[in-house]
Amino acid sequence: MAPIKVAVLDDYQGISEPKFRALDPAKFDVSFFPNTLPPYHHPGTSHETRDQIVARLEPFEVLCTMRERTPFPADLIARLPNLRLLLTTGNRNLALDLDALRARGIPVAGAVDRAHAGSVGSVSTTEHCVALVLAAARNVAQDDLAVKSGGWQTAPAVSLRGKTLGLVGLGRLGTAVARILGGAFGMRVVAWSENLTQERADQAARDAGLLAADGGGAGIRAVGKDELFRAADVVSLHLVLSDRTRGVVARRDLELMKPTAIFVNTSRGPLVVEEDLLDVLEQGRIRAAALDVFDLEPLPLDSRWRTTKWGEGGRSRVLLTPHMGYVEESTLDAWYDQQVENLLRWEKGEELSVKLC
């Protein structure tokens, strides 16, 4: 009997390889594709590239993917007749058309971050968000480049103490960021989302240790969207991407921001109208942006983001990281362990853990 053909996609750090190579080669024929191709369903993806994606994936019975790095829309799934199992990471992946996979009878299983109470890299993402806020406020990237290039100090840093943090979204991640920046750095916290009430903001503040049972403490104030963008010295996005939230931040919102403000996005690129954000930053209308996520990932080589001219000629300062919010060694290590575990369960006909469909 021929071994099961398995493809491991988009493992940039190579963490999966020793785990999958330890499988019995008589049962599993594993291939690795560490470079992500453009998304199949993106408007800019050519027919030739789509055919290249199909040619890469079509031979395999099992596909192991990392978060949303390779999306699987219905059109792509229909072109993969050999696919029998799809393994992803996290307990949610909006880049998978689960209805199309379910209709084909293809089981899908995720993987959770057991080290952090089942959260999906939330501790790592929180730390990364706070690191970006601090780096943007303290000019870390610019000063590092200056020293390495033979220069010395650049522009003065700004303090966060007493400044206003505006959270667009106040779920688990937004509350965690409020706990750190409000509690440790003394920032005032305001928040907005479509359904946020002051009652829910008070509960989040209690969870973050910013509001005592007797009402003492700074708390978190629920405000309107316009007020948040006008008042905040730091705006940080913490929403789940959906049809309702896609493009929720656009030019009008960004142009309300103070010229000294910092904009941070560690959630998802399409929450923001990217062209509007680029225009605002190229015009230098705010102090800085710190971004971990983009409309199209990885960024094309000719992307407008890929320039060292940020901070020059009247442009805002821009700090970029390549979607690293969840990319923590222990988390990825645990996720790939669970993918191997689920592969072995499936091969034996056993129930999958963290089954999505």
Image (cartoon, rainbow, N blue to C red):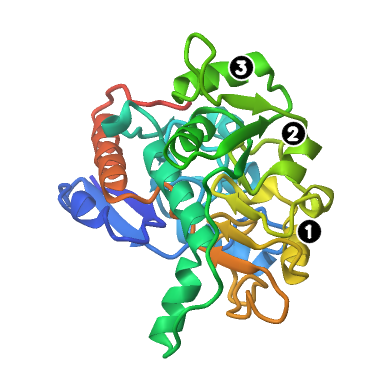
Residue that appears at 50% across and 67% down: 139
Residue that appears at 74% across and 71% down: 282
Q: Which residue is mark 3?
A: 200
User: Which mark is drawn over residue 106?
Assistant: none
Between 88 and 242, the one lying in front of the other is 242
Give the number of the mark in front: 1 or 3: 3
Indicate the secondary structure of the residue bearing disc 2. loop
Q: Which residue is mark 1?
A: 276
Q: Is residue 91 above or below residue 41?
A: above
Crowding near the residue tagged with mark 2, few <14, some 14–19, many ≥20 C-alpha atoms within 10 Å: few
Give the number of the mark in front: 1 or 2: 1
Residue 341 in view in this figure: yes
Between 83 and 172, the one lying in front of the other is 172
Which of the 4 image quarters holds residue 62?
top left
Residue 55 in view in this figure: no
Q: Measure the alpha-carbon separation of dots 2 and 3.
A: 20 Å
Quadrant where the N terminus lies?
A: top left
Q: Amino acid at mark 2?
A: Arg
